Image (cartoon, rainbow, N blue to C red):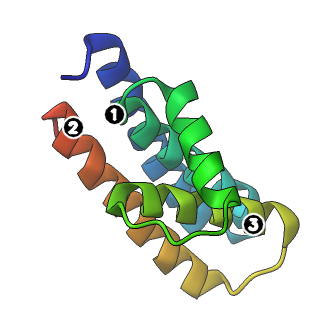
Amino acid sequence: MINHYRRGWALRYIREAKAELLAAKKTPRLASSLILEALRKARFAVYYSLGDPASIEMIVHKASSNGHEVKDPILKFLVEIEQMVQFFSEVPDFEYEKTIEYVSNVIQTASDIVELFTGEKA
């Protein structure tokens, strides 16, 4: 069971990820930095909902760097977010509409995971 402290941070991060995405939709010229921040916050929301964020982060980095296929669906999702964060950190130009749609789906999935583990709608 998740403690009150981590639940609070998970819910806060997912709310902020949604707000960053909304801001990216409203201000396309700032979209790249806002999308990157939204992905980071969605990632941290899931980390906090699963347990100790530092431990989860180490597991994700280990899974993403070993080159083997990840079978656990949540870990696979977190590895994909990590790869997206790396990609958007390195590539400032992207196809706006497709990226917004894709990141919106990622944030919704993160929100579903947070809701599952916290028992609260984000």
Q: Position of residue 84 (x, y in %)?
A: 65, 66
Which residue lies at the image location 58% right of the left edge and 69% below the top edge? Answer: 68
Secondary element type, mark 3: helix
* Discs 2/3, front: 2
Q: Quadrant of residue 6?
A: top left
Task: Assess whether mark 3 and mark 2 are in contact (beta carbons under 8 angstroms).
Answer: no
Q: Position of residue 35 (x, y in %)?
A: 63, 60
| 116 to the left or right of 43 | left
**Quick one: label 3, few (<14), some, or many (20+) residues within 10 Å?**
some
Figure disc tally = 3
Q: Residue tagged by mark 1?
A: 49
Q: Residue tagged by mark 2?
A: 117
For badge 3, the amino acid type reads Phe
For badge 2, the amino acid type reads Phe
Which residue lies at the image location 63% right of the left edge and 59% below the top edge? Answer: 64
| 121 to the left or right of 56 | left
Q: Quadrant of residue 104?
A: bottom left
Task: Assess whether mark 1 and mark 3 are in contact (beta carbons under 8 angstroms).
Answer: no
Which residue lies at the image location 54% right of the left edge and 75% below the top edge? Answer: 100
Q: Residue tagged by mark 3?
A: 88
Q: Position of residue 74 (x, y in %)?
A: 36, 56
Q: Nearer the viewer, residue 24 or 68?
A: 68
The residues tagged by marks 2 and 3 sit, at their Cα atoms, a distance apart of 28 Å
Task: Assess whether mark 2 and mark 1 are in contact (beta carbons under 8 angstroms).
Answer: yes
Looking at marks 2 and 3 on the same chain, the residue that comes earlier in the sequence is marked by 3
